[in-house]
Amino acid sequence: MQSGVCNLSVIAVRKEPSHKSEMITQLLFGDSYKIIEIKNDWAEICMAYDRYNGFISSGQVVPVSDEEYDTMNNFTMHSITDIVQVIYNKTKNITQGIFIGSSIPEINDELFILAGDTYLIRGNMTTDIPFGTDRTLIIEENIRKFVYTPYLWGGRAPFGIDCSGFVQIIYKLCGIKLPRDAGEQSQSGETIYFMNDAMPGDLMFFDNPEQIITHTGIYLGNNKIVHASGMVRIDDVDTTGIFNQDRQSYTHNMRLIRRIKA
Protein backbone atom coordinates (compact mmCIF):
# COMPACT_ATOMS: atom_id res chain seq x y z
CA MET A 1 0.00 0.00 0.00
CA GLN A 2 1.52 3.32 -1.09
CA SER A 3 2.18 6.07 1.47
CA GLY A 4 1.71 9.82 1.26
CA VAL A 5 2.13 13.04 3.23
CA CYS A 6 0.41 16.42 3.37
CA ASN A 7 2.75 19.20 2.21
CA LEU A 8 0.03 21.88 2.13
CA SER A 9 -1.20 23.93 5.07
CA VAL A 10 -4.49 21.99 5.16
CA ILE A 11 -6.34 19.48 3.00
CA ALA A 12 -10.04 18.65 3.27
CA VAL A 13 -10.79 14.96 3.81
CA ARG A 14 -14.28 14.10 2.56
CA LYS A 15 -16.72 11.33 3.35
CA GLU A 16 -17.28 10.45 -0.30
CA PRO A 17 -15.20 11.10 -3.48
CA SER A 18 -16.92 14.37 -4.36
CA HIS A 19 -16.29 18.05 -3.68
CA LYS A 20 -19.96 18.24 -2.66
CA SER A 21 -19.48 15.59 0.01
CA GLU A 22 -19.16 16.66 3.65
CA MET A 23 -15.71 17.32 5.07
CA ILE A 24 -15.16 14.82 7.88
CA THR A 25 -11.66 15.88 8.93
CA GLN A 26 -8.54 17.65 7.68
CA LEU A 27 -4.93 16.82 7.01
CA LEU A 28 -2.48 19.36 8.39
CA PHE A 29 1.05 19.87 7.11
CA GLY A 30 3.17 16.83 7.91
CA ASP A 31 0.25 14.43 8.42
CA SER A 32 0.99 11.13 6.73
CA TYR A 33 -1.39 8.52 5.38
CA LYS A 34 -1.72 5.25 3.54
CA ILE A 35 -3.29 5.34 0.08
CA ILE A 36 -5.99 2.70 -0.15
CA GLU A 37 -6.96 3.43 -3.75
CA ILE A 38 -6.66 6.16 -6.36
CA LYS A 39 -9.57 6.33 -8.77
CA ASN A 40 -10.06 9.18 -11.23
CA ASP A 41 -9.83 12.48 -9.33
CA TRP A 42 -9.91 11.00 -5.83
CA ALA A 43 -7.70 9.06 -3.46
CA GLU A 44 -9.08 7.06 -0.57
CA ILE A 45 -6.69 7.33 2.37
CA CYS A 46 -6.21 6.16 5.94
CA MET A 47 -4.57 8.77 8.17
CA ALA A 48 -1.61 7.48 10.16
CA TYR A 49 -2.27 9.61 13.25
CA ASP A 50 -5.79 8.42 14.08
CA ARG A 51 -6.61 5.74 11.45
CA TYR A 52 -9.37 7.93 10.02
CA ASN A 53 -10.51 7.06 6.49
CA GLY A 54 -11.73 9.45 3.83
CA PHE A 55 -11.13 10.91 0.39
CA ILE A 56 -8.80 13.67 -0.79
CA SER A 57 -8.28 15.11 -4.26
CA SER A 58 -5.77 12.96 -6.14
CA GLY A 59 -4.03 16.18 -7.22
CA GLN A 60 -3.11 16.77 -3.57
CA VAL A 61 -1.46 13.38 -3.08
CA VAL A 62 2.29 13.57 -2.38
CA PRO A 63 3.83 10.08 -2.31
CA VAL A 64 6.59 9.16 0.13
CA SER A 65 8.58 5.98 0.50
CA ASP A 66 7.54 3.40 3.06
CA GLU A 67 10.83 4.14 4.82
CA GLU A 68 9.99 7.84 5.19
CA TYR A 69 6.44 6.96 6.28
CA ASP A 70 7.79 4.62 8.94
CA THR A 71 10.27 7.25 10.11
CA MET A 72 7.51 9.84 10.48
CA ASN A 73 5.36 7.47 12.51
CA ASN A 74 7.94 5.66 14.63
CA PHE A 75 9.97 8.65 15.80
CA THR A 76 9.07 11.93 17.47
CA MET A 77 7.41 14.44 15.16
CA HIS A 78 7.44 17.98 16.55
CA SER A 79 4.18 19.94 16.53
CA ILE A 80 3.98 23.61 15.61
CA THR A 81 2.79 25.64 18.61
CA ASP A 82 2.40 29.06 16.96
CA ILE A 83 -1.11 29.68 15.57
CA VAL A 84 0.45 30.24 12.14
CA GLN A 85 4.09 29.53 11.31
CA VAL A 86 5.84 30.62 8.11
CA ILE A 87 8.21 28.09 6.54
CA TYR A 88 10.39 28.40 3.48
CA ASN A 89 10.65 25.61 0.92
CA LYS A 90 14.23 25.98 -0.31
CA THR A 91 13.79 23.32 -2.98
CA LYS A 92 10.87 25.08 -4.68
CA ASN A 93 11.79 28.61 -3.54
CA ILE A 94 8.36 29.28 -2.03
CA THR A 95 7.12 30.48 1.35
CA GLN A 96 4.03 29.02 2.96
CA GLY A 97 2.12 29.29 6.19
CA ILE A 98 1.28 26.24 8.28
CA PHE A 99 -1.01 25.92 11.29
CA ILE A 100 -0.65 25.04 14.94
CA GLY A 101 -0.64 21.26 15.33
CA SER A 102 1.21 20.68 12.05
CA SER A 103 3.88 17.97 12.23
CA ILE A 104 7.57 18.56 11.57
CA PRO A 105 10.21 15.80 11.28
CA GLU A 106 13.73 15.94 12.68
CA ILE A 107 15.32 19.39 12.39
CA ASN A 108 19.01 20.09 11.83
CA ASP A 109 20.23 23.70 11.84
CA GLU A 110 16.65 24.96 11.31
CA LEU A 111 16.25 22.69 8.26
CA PHE A 112 14.06 19.64 7.74
CA ILE A 113 13.21 17.42 4.79
CA LEU A 114 9.70 16.34 3.85
CA ALA A 115 8.86 14.36 0.70
CA GLY A 116 12.21 15.24 -0.86
CA ASP A 117 11.94 19.00 -0.30
CA THR A 118 14.17 20.93 2.11
CA TYR A 119 12.47 23.47 4.36
CA LEU A 120 13.76 26.26 6.56
CA ILE A 121 11.83 26.87 9.78
CA ARG A 122 12.25 29.36 12.59
CA GLY A 123 9.55 29.21 15.24
CA ASN A 124 8.12 27.51 18.28
CA MET A 125 7.29 23.84 18.44
CA THR A 126 6.92 21.06 20.95
CA THR A 127 9.87 19.29 22.43
CA ASP A 128 9.89 15.85 24.01
CA ILE A 129 7.76 15.92 27.15
CA PRO A 130 9.13 13.66 29.92
CA PHE A 131 6.86 10.82 31.00
CA GLY A 132 4.87 11.71 34.09
CA THR A 133 4.87 15.47 33.38
CA ASP A 134 1.73 17.30 34.53
CA ARG A 135 0.39 18.55 31.21
CA THR A 136 -2.30 20.82 32.67
CA LEU A 137 -0.34 24.03 32.09
CA ILE A 138 0.50 23.00 28.52
CA ILE A 139 -3.18 22.33 27.85
CA GLU A 140 -4.28 25.66 29.32
CA GLU A 141 -1.62 27.60 27.39
CA ASN A 142 -2.69 26.14 24.05
CA ILE A 143 -6.42 26.49 24.75
CA ARG A 144 -5.99 30.27 24.81
CA LYS A 145 -4.78 30.16 21.21
CA PHE A 146 -8.08 28.68 20.01
CA VAL A 147 -10.71 30.67 21.92
CA TYR A 148 -13.13 32.34 19.43
CA THR A 149 -12.02 30.07 16.60
CA PRO A 150 -15.19 29.52 14.52
CA TYR A 151 -16.83 26.11 14.54
CA LEU A 152 -16.32 24.12 11.35
CA TRP A 153 -17.59 20.57 10.89
CA GLY A 154 -14.53 18.38 10.26
CA GLY A 155 -12.11 21.21 11.04
CA ARG A 156 -8.76 20.79 12.82
CA ALA A 157 -7.24 24.22 12.14
CA PRO A 158 -7.32 27.58 14.00
CA PHE A 159 -9.52 29.17 11.33
CA GLY A 160 -12.24 26.54 11.76
CA ILE A 161 -12.48 23.55 14.10
CA ASP A 162 -15.04 21.11 15.47
CA CYS A 163 -15.37 19.88 19.05
CA SER A 164 -13.43 16.63 18.77
CA GLY A 165 -10.86 18.17 16.41
CA PHE A 166 -10.22 20.85 19.03
CA VAL A 167 -9.73 18.27 21.79
CA GLN A 168 -7.51 16.12 19.57
CA ILE A 169 -5.20 18.99 18.60
CA ILE A 170 -4.92 20.35 22.17
CA TYR A 171 -3.87 16.94 23.41
CA LYS A 172 -1.52 16.42 20.45
CA LEU A 173 0.30 19.59 21.50
CA CYS A 174 1.10 18.03 24.87
CA GLY A 175 2.19 14.71 23.41
CA ILE A 176 -0.98 12.66 23.87
CA LYS A 177 -2.60 10.93 20.89
CA LEU A 178 -6.40 10.73 20.79
CA PRO A 179 -8.86 9.32 18.23
CA ARG A 180 -10.69 11.74 15.94
CA ASP A 181 -14.36 11.45 16.95
CA ALA A 182 -15.94 12.27 20.32
CA GLY A 183 -17.43 8.78 20.62
CA GLU A 184 -14.04 7.14 20.21
CA GLN A 185 -12.32 9.68 22.47
CA SER A 186 -14.82 8.83 25.22
CA GLN A 187 -13.30 5.34 25.38
CA SER A 188 -9.83 6.69 26.19
CA GLY A 189 -8.47 7.12 29.69
CA GLU A 190 -10.30 6.40 32.92
CA THR A 191 -13.78 7.37 34.08
CA ILE A 192 -14.24 10.08 36.71
CA TYR A 193 -17.53 9.27 38.43
CA PHE A 194 -18.17 12.45 40.38
CA MET A 195 -18.12 16.05 39.18
CA ASN A 196 -16.35 17.12 42.36
CA ASP A 197 -13.43 14.86 41.43
CA ALA A 198 -12.96 16.41 37.99
CA MET A 199 -9.66 18.20 37.41
CA PRO A 200 -8.55 20.78 34.83
CA GLY A 201 -7.66 18.97 31.60
CA ASP A 202 -10.24 16.20 32.03
CA LEU A 203 -12.44 15.52 29.02
CA MET A 204 -16.21 15.83 29.31
CA PHE A 205 -18.61 14.11 26.94
CA PHE A 206 -22.21 14.89 26.11
CA ASP A 207 -24.93 12.88 24.40
CA ASN A 208 -28.08 13.43 22.36
CA PRO A 209 -31.63 12.17 23.15
CA GLU A 210 -30.67 8.79 21.62
CA GLN A 211 -27.81 8.61 24.17
CA ILE A 212 -25.17 8.82 21.43
CA ILE A 213 -22.10 10.85 22.38
CA THR A 214 -21.98 13.80 20.00
CA HIS A 215 -19.96 16.47 21.82
CA THR A 216 -16.84 16.91 23.92
CA GLY A 217 -14.90 19.62 25.67
CA ILE A 218 -12.06 20.20 28.15
CA TYR A 219 -12.75 20.94 31.80
CA LEU A 220 -11.03 24.07 33.11
CA GLY A 221 -11.92 23.75 36.78
CA ASN A 222 -14.32 25.94 38.78
CA ASN A 223 -17.29 24.57 36.84
CA LYS A 224 -16.01 25.93 33.50
CA ILE A 225 -15.55 24.09 30.22
CA VAL A 226 -13.95 25.08 26.91
CA HIS A 227 -15.52 23.54 23.83
CA ALA A 228 -16.27 24.23 20.16
CA SER A 229 -19.94 25.11 19.73
CA GLY A 230 -20.52 27.93 17.27
CA MET A 231 -17.00 28.92 18.21
CA VAL A 232 -14.41 27.77 20.72
CA ARG A 233 -15.92 29.22 23.88
CA ILE A 234 -15.89 28.93 27.66
CA ASP A 235 -19.18 28.06 29.36
CA ASP A 236 -20.50 26.92 32.71
CA VAL A 237 -20.80 23.18 33.28
CA ASP A 238 -22.38 21.02 35.98
CA THR A 239 -23.81 17.53 36.40
CA THR A 240 -26.71 18.44 34.10
CA GLY A 241 -24.50 19.63 31.25
CA ILE A 242 -23.26 22.82 29.60
CA PHE A 243 -25.08 26.03 30.47
CA ASN A 244 -24.79 28.74 27.83
CA GLN A 245 -24.92 32.16 29.46
CA ASP A 246 -25.79 33.88 26.18
CA ARG A 247 -28.86 31.70 25.69
CA GLN A 248 -29.56 31.27 29.40
CA SER A 249 -30.18 27.58 28.82
CA TYR A 250 -28.51 24.17 28.82
CA THR A 251 -27.19 23.22 25.38
CA HIS A 252 -25.52 19.83 25.96
CA ASN A 253 -26.44 16.92 28.23
CA MET A 254 -23.63 15.55 30.44
CA ARG A 255 -22.80 11.88 29.83
CA LEU A 256 -19.38 11.15 31.33
CA ILE A 257 -15.97 12.47 32.33
CA ARG A 258 -12.67 10.86 31.36
CA ARG A 259 -9.11 11.51 32.52
CA ILE A 260 -6.37 10.98 29.96
CA LYS A 261 -2.87 10.16 31.14
CA ALA A 262 0.31 10.03 29.06
Image (cartoon, rainbow, N blue to C red):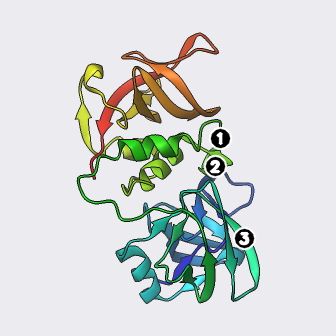
Distance from the alpha carbon under mark 3 to that under mark 2: 16 Å
Q: Quarter of the image holding residue 95?
A: bottom right
Q: Residues within 10 Å of mark 1 (few under 14, many from 20)?
A: many
Distance from the alpha carbon under mark 1 to that under mark 2: 6 Å
For label 2, the residue is 158
* Amino acid of disc 3: Gln
For label 3, the SS is: strand
Q: Residue furthest top?
A: 248
Q: Residues within 10 Å of mark 2 (few under 14, many from 20)?
A: many
* Amino acid of disc 1: Thr
Indicate which disc residue 149 carries. 1
Position in image of residue 138 (x %, y %)? 42, 47
For label 2, the SS is: loop
For label 1, the SS is: loop
Give the left or right position of residue 64, taking residue 185 as reference.
Answer: right
Give the left or right position of residue 131, taking residue 113 as reference.
Answer: left
Give the answer, above or below, for where 139 lies relative to 80: above
Give the answer, above or below, for where 197 lies relative to 153: above
Q: Earlier in the sequence, mark 3 or mark 1?
A: 3
- Total marks in image: 3
Q: Is residue 40 visible?
A: no
Q: Is residue 251 visible?
A: yes
Position in image of residue 192 (x %, y %)? 25, 30
- Is label 3 in contact with label 1 (beta carbons under 8 Å)? no
Give the answer, above or below, for where 137 lies relative to 212: below
For label 3, the residue is 96
Q: Earlier in the sequence, mark 3 or mark 2?
A: 3
- Is label 1 in contact with label 2 (beta carbons under 8 Å)? yes
Q: Earlier in the sequence, mark 1 or mark 2?
A: 1
